Amino acid sequence: MNKPKRHIAVKSIVGIVLLLVVFAAVVSVIGYRSFSSALMDQYTEGAFLTAKAAARLIDCDSIDEYEQSGGTGEKYEETWAALDTLCNTSGSTFIYVILPDRTDYAHIKFLFSTIDHNSSYSVYSFGYLRDTTNDEYREKYRALYELESDRELVVRNKGYIETGNHITAMIGLKDYKGEVKAILCVQRQMDVMSKTLRSYMSRIFLAFAVLALLVIAGQALYLHRVLLKPLNQISEEAARFSAENTPAETRLQDKIKSNDEIGVLAASVDNMEQQIHDYVDNITRITAEKERINTELGLATRIQAAMLPGIFPPFPERAEFDIYASMDPAKEVGGDFYDFFLIDDDHLGLVIADVSGKGVPAALFMMASKIILANNAKMGKSPAQVLTDTNTAICSNNREEMFVTVWLGILEISTGKLTAANAGHEYPVLLAPGGRYELYKDKNGFVIGGMDNMKYKEYELMLKPGAKLFLYTDGVPEATNAEGELFGTGRMLAALNADTAAPPEDVLKNMRAAVDDFVKDAEQFDDLTMLCLEYRG
C-alpha cells in the first residue's frame, strides 16, 4: 500500500495554525490599537496633570514681575527650583514657560526652562528667543491666548531624530482677570510608551506561541485518536480486502466504535466488502453458467452447421450443375437455412428458408422445418404439395406461433426444367446465358406455420446451359450501415452483375464482400444466407 505524501493530520494542523495566525494577527492589531489608544490617553492625561501641578507653583499674577526680574530674585528662583523638582519627579522631560509674540505667534521667549537631568536636553536661559517650531504650534498658542481652548496637545511621533518622539501638553497661565499671561508646556518623551507597547506585543506573541503549541499538541492527539487511527484501520482493511477479496474476521464497526462520519464510513466499508464479495461470487457463478452456455451454444453451432450441406462440391460426379451455399448467423446459432439434395438421379431439390426470430429457438424451429421439408420432398411430391404438407405438419404443433418463409425448387437435371413454389420468401434472381442477373417476381404464398389449411401454387422455369439461380434471405438486402441505410436489392443486383461469369462460389464471396464494404463496422442484426446454382446441362 502506498504511503500518503502528506498526512491529513499535518494538513489539518497547518490549517488550524494558519487560522490561529490570522486570529492572532487580528486580535493583536485590535489589541495594539486599543492598548495604544488607552496608553496614549493615559500618557496625555499624565502630562496635563503635571502641567496643572506646575501651574499651581507659578504665581500667574507675577508673570510681569518675573519677566522684569531678568531671571533673578528669590521668588523667581524658588519657582524655578520647584518646577525643576517637579520635572525630575514626574517623568517629564521638559517643563517650560514661554511668552509668544502675540502679533503672529512666530516667535517665543522662554520665561522658565527646566529639564530632566538624565535627558540630553539643555536648559534654555531666561529670555531666550527662538522661532516657533511650526504652524501647528503657532495655532495652538493662538487658541490658548484667545481662550478658544483651555489646553492643547502636540504629538510628534514621526521619527524626530533631534528631539525624539514626544508629546507636549500646553495650558494657559491666567491672571486674576482670567487673561492668559503665558503658556506652560510639559514635554514627555514617548520612548517609555514605546517600550510599554513593545512589551505588550511581546507578551501577546509569547501567549500566541504557547497557545499554538498547546493547540498543535492537543489537536495532534485528538486527530490521532478520533481520525487518523480509525482512518488507518479503514485504509489497511481496504488494502487487505483488495488483495484477499474476503470479508474481515472482525468488522470495522466492531473496531471503530463511533457514531460520527468515521463510524458511518466504517459501516459503509463493511457493507461494501460484503456486497463486493457477494457480487464476485455471483459473477463467478454467472461466468461459469455463461461458459456452460457458450459451450452448449458452440455445440449447437456445430450441430446446426452439420445439419446444412457444407462440403463443396457436394456432387463432384455430376457435371450437369454446380452449386454453392453459405449461412452466416447473426448470433451463435441462426434461423436461416439452405438445403439441396438429390431426390433421384434426375431431380435436385433446392431449399432456402428464413425462420422468424433469432438464436436457439429459431435454430430448433429451423432444424424441424428442414427435416420436414426434406422428407416431404424426397417422397416425390411437387413443390406446392411439399409446402402444403409441411405447413400442415408445423401448424399441428406450433405453440410458440413461429413461422418460416421458404422457397423450394425441384430441378429436372436432364431438361433444365425448374418447378418452384414460394411461401412468403424473397424473390429469386435469375441469370440467362449471356444476360444479366434479374429478379424473378414469382407469386408468394403465405408463410409456413402462419395459418393451417393453406394451399400453395407452383410455377415452372426452363434453365438453359449457363443459366444461374441466386437465392438469398432478407439479411442480404436488409443489411444496414451505421447511417441506417439499407443495402437493398439494387446494390445486390449491381454486385451480382459486376461479374456475371463468376462461378457459384465466387458469386457468394463477391456478394459477401459487397455487403461487408457497405455496412463496414455496423453490427449485423440478421442472418446472411445465400445459395447459387449454375446449370450446365
Image (cartoon, rainbow, N blue to C red):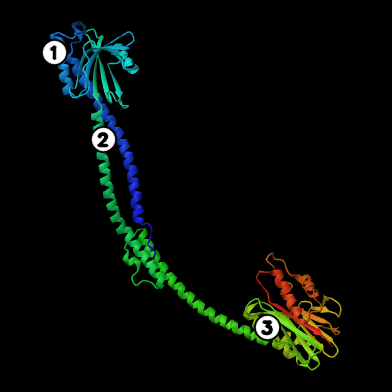
Q: Position of residue 411 (x, y in %)?
A: 81, 87
* SS label for mark 3: helix
* Point 25% across, 30% down: residue: 193
- Who is closer to the viewer here, 127 or 468? 127
* SS label for mark 2: helix
Q: Looking at the image, do the residues carrying marks 1 and 3 touch, with CB atoms under 8 Å apart?
A: no
Q: Which label's residue is closer to the chain start, 2 or 1?
A: 1
* Disc 2 packing (10 Å; few <14; some 14–19; many ≥20): few
Compared with 27, 298 (above or below) is below
- Who is closer to the viewer here, 290 or 26? 26
Q: Amino acid at mark 2?
A: Arg
Q: Amino acid at mark 3?
A: Met
Q: Position of residue 469 (x, y in %)?
A: 80, 81
Q: Which label's residue is closer to the chain start, 1 or 3?
A: 1
Q: Which label's residue is closer to the chain start, 2 or 3?
A: 2
Q: Is residue 182 left or right of residue 134?
A: left
Where residue 349 sits, quadrant-wise, is: bottom right
How much space separates mark 2 and mark 1, taking CA atoms?
A: 40 Å
Where residue 336 sits, quadrant-wise, is: bottom right
Q: Which residue is mark 1?
A: 78
Compared with 246, 197 (above or below) is above
How much space separates mark 1 and mark 3, taking CA atoms?
A: 141 Å
Tell me the tag on residue 366.
3
Q: State which mark lies toward you, 2 or 3.
A: 2
- Who is closer to the viewer here, 422 or 164? 164
